Structures are given as C-alpha cells and as structure tokens.
Image (cartoon, coloured by chain):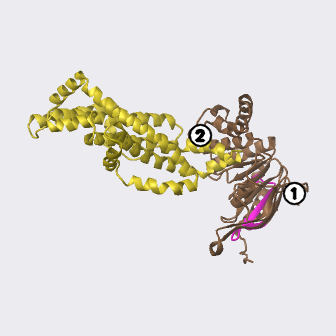
Chain colours: A yellow, B brown
C-alpha cells in the first residue's frame, strides 16, 4: 500500500470522493468568477459563458456541432480500432508479419496525424473523408501497438498450460491469447480514443464547415470569447465522458485481473 | 530396470539437451537414462542447473531433445499429449476463468458435452476440496488453493502420468506439508505415475518411492535412492529415524556431490 498524506486520507474517509469532485468543481467556478469579476484578465465570466451555452443549446447549434464532431471521432476511431486489433494480433503472433509491418507502424507513429491534413485535403477534398482519415490514422496507430504488445506479453506458462491440456495453436489463439491481451488492448483503446478526440478538434480548426473546432475558429474571427469557452468546456466534458465509458468497459471486461486497490 | 521390474511407463534414453550454438553452447542435460514404472511416484532433486526442469519439459513435450529420446508407454514423445498432465510452479491458472472453467478447460477442448464436463469437474473439485470455490476467480484464492485447482485441472483430462515442476515451491512451510499430504491422498485414490521435481530434500523423501538425485554442469543423473518407508506416509513416518536416515543420504547426495570433470 502506498503511504498517503494523512490529512488528505482523513478527508477521504469522511467524504465520499464524488462529493470531493463536486467540491473541487465548485471551487474552480468560484475562482474563475473571482478572477473575471475583479477584471484581472479580459475573459468572460461564468455567467456570460453559461448564458451563451444556453443560447447555443436553444438554437440547436451546440447539438449540431457536438453531433458532427462525435460522428467524425466515432467513425474514424471504430475504423482505426477495427483494423488495428487484427493487425496487432498478426504482428504479435507471426514473426514475419511483425518484420513486415512494424517499420511502417513505427515510421507513421513519428508523424503527428495533424501533419497529414494538408495531404489529406489535397487528395481527398474538403468534406468528411480527410478528417475521418486523420482520426482513423491516429486511433489505428495507438491501438495497433497496444494489441501487438498484448500478444507478445502473454505469459509463456499460460500458453504451455493450454498446450499440455491438449490445445493446438488454433485453440490457444482465441482461448488464451485474446483474453490475456484484452487489458493491453483496452489501454490502447483508451489512448486511441483520447488522441482521436484531440485530433478531430484540431482538424476542424483547420478545415471544416461544422463541429466544435469549427465553431471556435468562427468565434475567433468575431472575437466571440464566450462561444470559444462553451466549445472548450464541451470538448473537455465529452472527452471525459468517453474516457469514463471506456474505463467502465475496462473494469467490466477485466474483473479477473489482480490490481492494486 | 524399474522398481517393479515391469515395462516402464516413462523412459529417458540417452536424453541430451543443449541450448545455444557453437562456443556459447550450454549442455543442460547430458545423456540421461532413467526408467519410471507405472504408478510409481518419483521425486527429482538436485542443485540449480542440474537439468531437472529441462528433463520434465522434454517429457511434457514442451521442449525438443538434442539427442536421445523419451518414451511414454514405449512410444516416443512428440509434443504434449493428453496422457501426460503437467503442473507448473507458477500455477498457470487462466485468470479470466473461474475455478470450474479452469478445470473444464481441457474437457472443452476435447469437445465433451456440457453435462459430462460438469460431472468430471465436480468430481475433481471435490477431490481437491475446492467444491465451494467452483465459481471463484483465481485471484481470490490462496497459493495452496490455486495449486489444488491446477492439480484438479491436470487430473480432469485423465492423464496416466503427472509431471510436476516444483509445484509447492512458492508455498509457505505449513501449507506445503498440508499439500504434500493431500497430494499423497489424491494419488492413493487416483493412482498415476508421478514425476515430481523439488529442491526440498524432506519433500523429496516424504513423497517418493524413489528419489532421483541429479548433478549440475553438465546436468546429469547422479544417483537413485530407494525410499523404503511404509506405503502410507504420515507424521509418524516423517518423524521416524528411518526417514531421517534416508533424508541424510539424499542430503549428502545433493549437497556433497563430487565435481565431475567434463568428458
């Protein structure tokens, strides 16, 4: 057990962590309000941003932006993960596949997905295709490495144990390799989804006609700070929600894992 | 050349295993010759590097020989087989499966009907005393329970021989003694040929019909010590002067080996 600060541990015993989360959130709002009310910085305050959020929500604009951004992330991410998992398994299981694919994976990992946007726009036009492609690339690269790592990290004794119980490679793969690498894959999925979300917003800043990134880029032109704030906060909240969903799935799928509480 | 003089269940014939190539080649096992009778319980002791685990992995079909051959029921070993159950020191339970699913793993592969799998797993879970933990995940079990589950899993596929690689090595002394008694109890009720590796001299003597002592660098057979103790082993046997005498004999064979000049 890691030793924790006695004071923080004491608070933790008395208040459930959800209440602490709410407390921290409230404190943040108060600090924000205090700074802007005192005119320390020229930024919109919480009331202004909240009013703008209500306006954008009422006009349906916010929902449209959220929908466009989410649609891009989810389609790009699902395509990326769907390809990455079989490719990662292939790389982990067959030495030849690893030698053939790994140089490409390592090379493309060094290129930030956003750097591909100019090329993607030139070759795929300015509608959905280039954005989805870039997100696909970002999530594919995070997931493929995780799936590959998962396969090569499977405990040899488990494979031997399956083998002496009569399992052939065709049985070992679905019954041992896949379940044993699920924790690794889920870590990759989490990282992949995070980088997909970061990429979509940036891609929309560069080239889009809708989406949260596009809304911010438009607001920038008109010095519309409250709208920028609404978009930023929405991006943060949606990112958090997606991450929590993956985490919840992770806990459900890996209850068998021994972990530090 | 077996204890009973019958046809051997498991025989090593000039089994040699090298690791690596050329200058760096390492001789892990040098011309091992050994016969083990059907239903016999042999324990194997020796210093680290004596090739005891190598010999077991070869018998299990998880490792190839460099020279020589291993015969099971007179037939050469070529890969793992259902007649040889293996129990590893690290338990090697599938952590995502429950105790029962672990025990049924080999039965599912065989394609037995669900009812039959259930009947067999019930039987072996009861045999090792885990019937109340059938639906538990391995992470909730103690070391001794994990190893009992591994034993039930190995027994379930109906092997005629068990190969055990320091199965109780990770357990504390008290649990270990308890597990030894339980293993002997299981063995007396469901008789199998057992090839049991250990580094614990007491354990080697307590469990065995014969103790195989091996020597290191290169790994080879050092000597075979018959254990002339009553068939039913209990505390009385463990504390008897006869036990102490055989234990001394094995101790000397293991810890006072004369270094052998490599030929």
Please name the residue that numbered disc 2 is placed on: B138
Of residues B11 and A87, the one nearer the viewer is: A87
Please give left or right for residue A25 compared with residue B188 in the image.
Answer: left
Residue B212 falls within the magenta-colored stretch? yes
Residue at the spot 22% in from the left edge and 26% down from the top edge = A56
Residue B249 placement: quadrant: bottom right
Chain that bears disc 1: B
Looking at this view, is A87 or A164 the one in front? Answer: A87
Query: Please, which chain is the residue tagged with disc 2 on?
Result: B
Q: Quadrant of the C terminus of chain B?
A: bottom right
Sooner in the amino-acid sequence: mark 1 or mark 2: 1
Camera-side residue of A171 and A166: A171
In percent of width and height, residue B107 lies at: 72, 37
Q: Which mark is residue A144?
A: none
Residue appearing at x 51%, y 47% in the figure: A87
In the image, is residue A104 part of the stretch drawn in magenta?
no
Question: What are the residue bounds of the magenta stretch?
Answer: B206-222
Percent position of residue A250, x then y = 46, 37
Residue A261 shows in the view = no
Q: What element does badge 1 sit on?
A: loop
């Amino acid at each position: 057990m890691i030793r924790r600060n006695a004071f923080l541990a004491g608070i933790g015993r008395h208040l459930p962590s959800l209440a602490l989360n709410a407390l921290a959130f409230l404190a943040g709002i108060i600090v924000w309000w205090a700074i802007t009310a005192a005119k320390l910085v020229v930024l919109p305050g919480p009331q202004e941003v909240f009013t703008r959020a209500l306006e954008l929500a009422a006009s349906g604009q916010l929902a449209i932006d959220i929908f466009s951004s989410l649609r891009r992330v989810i389609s790009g991410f699902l395509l990326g993960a769907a390809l990455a998992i079989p490719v990662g398994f292939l790389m982990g299981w067959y030495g030849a596949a690893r030698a053939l694919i790994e140089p490409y994976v390592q090379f493309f990992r060094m290129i930030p997905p956003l750097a591909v946007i100019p090329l993607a726009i030139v070759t795929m036009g300015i509608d959905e295709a280039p954005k989805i492609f870039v997100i696909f690339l970002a999530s594919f690269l995070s997931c493929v490495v995780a799936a590959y790592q998962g396969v090569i990290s499977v405990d040899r004794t488990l494979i031997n144990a399956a083998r002496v119980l009569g399992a052939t490679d065709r049985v070992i793969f679905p019954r041992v390799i896949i379940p044993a690498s699920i924790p690794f894959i889920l870590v990759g999925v989490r990282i992949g989804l995070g980088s997909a979300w970061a990429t979509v917003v940036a891609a929309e800043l560069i080239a889009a006609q809708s989406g949260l990134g596009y809304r911010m880029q438009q607001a920038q032109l008109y010095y519309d700070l409250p709208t920028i704030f609404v978009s930023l906060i929405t991006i943060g909240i949606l990112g958090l929600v997606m991450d929590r969903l993956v985490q919840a799935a992770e806990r459900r799928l890996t209850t068998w894992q021994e972990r530090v509480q | 050349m077996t204890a009973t003089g019958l046809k051997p269940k498991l025989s090593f014939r000039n089994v040699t295993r090298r690791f690596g190539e050329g200058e760096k080649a390492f001789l892990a096992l040098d011309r091992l010759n050994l016969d083990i009778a059907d239903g016999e319980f042999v324990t194997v002791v020796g210093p680290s590097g004596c090739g005891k685990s190598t010999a077991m992995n070869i018998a299990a079909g998880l490792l190839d020989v460099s020279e020589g051959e291993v015969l099971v029921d007179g037939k050469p070993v070529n890969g793992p087989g259902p007649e040889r159950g293996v129990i590893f020191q690290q338990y090697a339970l599938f952590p995502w499966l429950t105790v029962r699913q672990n025990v049924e793993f080999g039965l599912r592969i065989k394609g037995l009907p669900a009812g039959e799998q259930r009947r067999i797993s019930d039987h072996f879970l009861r045999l090792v005393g885990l019937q109340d933990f059938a639906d538990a995940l391995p992470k909730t079990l103690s070391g001794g329970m994990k190893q009992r589950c591994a034993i039930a899993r190995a027994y379930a596929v109906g092997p005629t021989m068990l190969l055990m690689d320091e199965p109780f090595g990770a357990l504390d002394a008290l649990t270990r003694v308890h597990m030894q008694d339980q293993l002997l109890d299981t063995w007396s009720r469901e008789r199998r040929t057992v090839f049991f590796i250990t580094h614990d001299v007491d354990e080697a003597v307590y469990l065995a019909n014969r103790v195989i002592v091996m020597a290191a660098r290169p790994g080879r057979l050092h000597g075979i010590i018959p254990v002339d103790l009553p068939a039913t082993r209990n505390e009385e046997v463990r504390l008897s002067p006869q036990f102490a005498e055989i234990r001394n004999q094995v101790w000397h064979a293991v810890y006072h080996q004369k270094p052998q000049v490599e030929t």
